[in-house]
Image: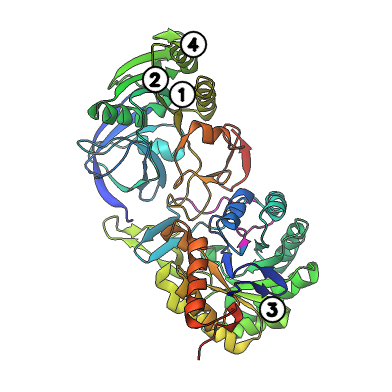
Amino acid sequence: MLPIKTKVLKAEKENEKVIRLTLGLQLSGAQPGQFVMVWVPGVDEKPISISESKPTLEICVANAGPASEKIASLKAGDEIFIRGPLGHGFEQKGRKWLMVGGGYGFGPLRFLARVGKDNGKSVEAILGARTKSLLMKKAVCETCFVTNDGSEGKTGTSVDELERRLADKNAKTDMVFSCGPERMMAAVAQACKKHGVPSQLLVERYMKCGFGICGHCAMGKWLACVDGPAIYGEEALSNPEFGKEHQDRCGCKKPL
Amino acid sequence: MIKLEVSVAGVKMCNPLVLAAGVRSNYADLLIRAAKEGAGAVTSKSCSLEPRPGHPNPTAMIHGQVVMNAIGLSNPGAKEEAEQLKKAVKEAGVPVIASVFGKNADEFAEASKIIEKAKPAMIELNISCPNVHREGRMFSADPAATEEIVRAVKKAVKLPVSAKLSPNVTDIAEIAVAAKRGGADAITAINTLSGMWIDAYAKKPYLANRQGGVSGPGIKPVALRCVWQIRQAVDLPIIGGGGITSGTDAAEMLMAGATAVSIGSAVCYRKNAFAEISKELAEFMESEGYAKVSDIKMD
């Protein structure tokens, strides 16, 4: 799979940290949860989740490191290269979906929510962030905003709100999808397990090849690039590295 | 009754398929996974004395019959690698071959000593990575350097040692002879072909390292030729590989003179590469009347 040249059509600020790039490229068959390798020649290549496929490809980039900072500073008209779609996306099972996002993890969940609504699913979302300026406010379904400091929406964490919803016997949620910091997702998976509701998460690891040859992005025996990045919560919880350890660029194990 | 067992320098394997170094082999859990998927032995990703981050991305691509990479030997360093290997040796249930590299013979020997503590079945010397040119020479292009490194490691450890050779040389047989002179117990061949991929629209090399190693089904003819030439020159066991993705590919590699067959890029082309290739090899042996792997020879 070769990289395809495309142009940035729009670069819009979602919040203090996140830029949404609309690209002039259609990737037919791209599924929510899948990612693309974004190559900026001479700079770097990074895996980024797809945050919309229609009418054209859209990605949300958090200004979080030297490479993503460069990607996040792209402007309309700039050229980039896309390899993908890659990986195994979310399984769109169940009828009553609840999205639980943390920080900049909301992009791929928004794509999933839109696809779910198109397919007649009932979809609601919870989005948490530390503070108001880190919320991704663009919503495609009924979204409950939560901030740790109470600067917007409810005060607390997205997991608190999830617990409240799962405890509500009338809610009938039958699939929870989550993307955000891994320890938050671990709490989401635990809460869902406790209430007997299946969950799917999107796991991130330092990635090199993106197609399953180099093995760098492993979480235990599981490879984020080809076995994931989507994974069922129960499977993640049974993986001894989930929520605990990842690898740096050398492959040294580090606590999360 | 078809017997798939082989023995490479005294290392007994339940089938001839060896996970190649650098392919999903960075951590214990991945080595164990390949063993469970049906590999007869597994080779860990090359490690050096100190941790290395490798090259920046892009580091790899796959297109048609070709895979390219310039990962740049990223690894956590021999001490952390030894911990991973200990777990793999304990839990894989198949022989674990540990790949080692260094900047000179002393570093190869020192890293091998650290790795030996994890009790792998064999040490494989990566003297043939095409992607770290700018840090020095590729040792396997030079018979004297090849011999010196093998000799230094043989002196440092008690384990069997295999030298992994590069196809990017004028005469690979000459290098195999040098490895044998240094005391090698086996030869692994081939490492990737040195190559380059230019993206016409980017007007730049795709890999950040500009050059990279070519693997994948497209390189099988080169690998067969190299292994055949090595077989003519030395009587050492050979772990032969390069573009092997099917049972008949494996049979061809054995006919070229390999004792065992390494599997690398095939894991990207087939979901259950090890199980499927060994099943196909057994079927081929059945249909062609071979009882054991060492019977498979060219007429």
Please, what is the three-letter code of the amino acid marked with disc 1?
A: Val
Estimate the x, y position of residue A138 in percent, counting from the top left. 29, 21
Q: Which residues are magenta?
A: B42-57
Q: Secondary structure at mark 4?
A: loop
Cβ–Cβ below 8 Å for labels 2 and 1?
yes
**Does mark 1 fall on the same chain as mark 4?**
yes
Q: Nearer the viewer, mark 3 or mark 1?
A: 1
Residue lying at 48% horizontally and 57% vertically, measured from the top left? B272
Disc number for residue A197: 1
Residue B207 visible, this angle:
no
Q: Say which residue label 4 marks.
A: A156
Q: Chain of mark 4?
A: A
Cβ–Cβ below 8 Å for labels 4 and 1?
no
Q: Chain of mark 3?
A: B
Q: Earlier in the sequence, mark 4 or mark 2?
A: 4
Which of the pair A217/B252 is nearer the observer? B252
Estimate the x, y position of residue A158 in percent, counting from the top left. 46, 17
Q: Secondary structure at mark 1?
A: loop
Disc number for residue B147: 3
Q: In which image quadrant can residue B199 be found?
A: bottom left
Question: Residue lying furthest bottom in this view?
Answer: B299
How far apart are the two marked residues, 4 and 1, measured between alpha carbons? 22 Å
Cβ–Cβ below 8 Å for labels 3 and 2?
no
Please, what is the three-letter code of the amino acid marked with disc 3?
A: Glu
Q: Say which residue label 2 marks.
A: A173
Please, what is the three-letter code of the amino acid marked with disc 4?
A: Gly
Estimate the x, y position of residue B294 in percent, counting from the top left. 61, 81
Category of crowding for the residue at label 3, using alpha-carbon neighbours closer than 10 angstroms: few (below 14), some (14–19), many (at least 20): many
**Does mark 1 fall on the same chain as mark 2?**
yes
How far apart are the two marked residues, 3 and 2, measured between alpha carbons? 66 Å
